[in-house]
Image: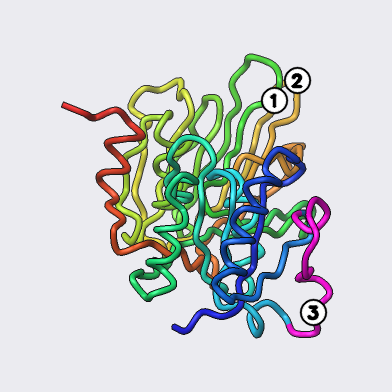
Amino acid sequence: MHIKNIGLFGKFNDHSVADAVIHVKNFLEKNNLAVYLGHTTSSQIDGMRLEDQDEPPNKLLDLSIVVGGDGTMLSVARELSKFGVPAVGINLGRLGFLTDIPMSNFESAISSILEGNFHIEQRTLLKCRVVRDSEKVLSSTALNDIVLSKGNMGRLIEFSIHVNDQYVAKPRGDGLIISTPTGSTAYALSAGGPIIYPDLPVICFSPICPHTLSNRPILLSETDKIHISNIEPNEFPPNLALDGMMLMELDGSEIIHISRAKRKLQLVKSDRFNYFETLNNKLGWHG
């Protein structure tokens, strides 16, 4: 892949990231690369704006660089996946699973990628569709997870789970996390879910603080279809969140349909990248 045109995205609504983005932009332009700024990034610094171009991103961009952290990548990933633009992340804080290039070493790492020393990982996304009274009220995608959780009151909720139209269970607890392999090291890990190697074709659902302790995480094929219904709320409405962003409150009448999205995120990794080294660093496995 010959890289000439690069999209550059910074952390949303954070002016402190501007200096880092400018540094990356200057480095790329010194290497004779055309740099196009995402719309929130272009509001902070000067440059060619992606939104002003006649061509769509999939026709224009060869690569996107996301500067920030894993949260920034999650915010940008849904848009990038629509266009099939490969993305690489530069981390400004602690090492991330998605943004694994440290800012202190970005010039060397990006130079290596520009020389062709990289591979592309195809990361699964989940599609979430919510139906209320036979009407679709939400349709969106998630890279990490889809979370059904109780409202503000400290009381349990109850709901039914079906997989491929087969009844699974009606757990009581604080909610449910449906995660991709990418999301297995996020919220799902805190709920006792397994760490899943990123390219495994599976989906995991993990109960949140189940009242019945035998309710355990279950791995499914990524081709399986999950339905959540008969949601019995407490006094406060349950919440539905995708990738950590609360999208809607539920009244209990909804049916939540979850399946693998047709598109995937193309995540660029340097050939130097070691997944297990990242696990060691993030999870403190040092012996």
Which residue is rendered at x = 48% and y = 68% of the image? Answer: 266
Q: Residues within 10 Å of mark 3 (few under 14, many from 20)?
A: few
Q: Image quadrant for the N terminus?
A: bottom left
Mark 3–mark 1 CB contact (< 8 Å): no
Sequence-wise, the earlier of marks 2 and 1 is: 1
* Foreground: disc 3 or disc 2: 3
Give the amino acid type for the residue marked by disc 1 in the picture.
Gly
State how far apart marks 3 and 2 are (Cα). Answer: 49 Å
Between marks 2 and 1 in the image, the one whose residue lies nearer the viewer: 1
- The x and y percentages for residue 195 are 32, 42
Q: Residue 235 — which label?
A: 2
The residue sitting at the left extreme is 287
Tell me, yes or no, whether the two marked residues, 2 and 1, touch with CB atoms within 8 Å.
yes
Quick one: label 2, few (<14), some, or many (20+) residues within 10 Å? Answer: few
The residue at which mark 3 appears reads as: 53
Tell me which label, 3 or 1, sits earlier in the chain. Answer: 3
Helix, strand, or loop for circle 2?
loop
> At 73% from the left edge and 40% from the top edge, which residue is drawn?
14
Which quarter of the image is occupied by the C terminus? top left
Q: Secondary structure at mark 1?
A: loop
Residue at 35% x, 56% y is 198
Residue 109 at x, y percent in the picture: 40, 58
Q: Which residues are magenta?
A: 41-55
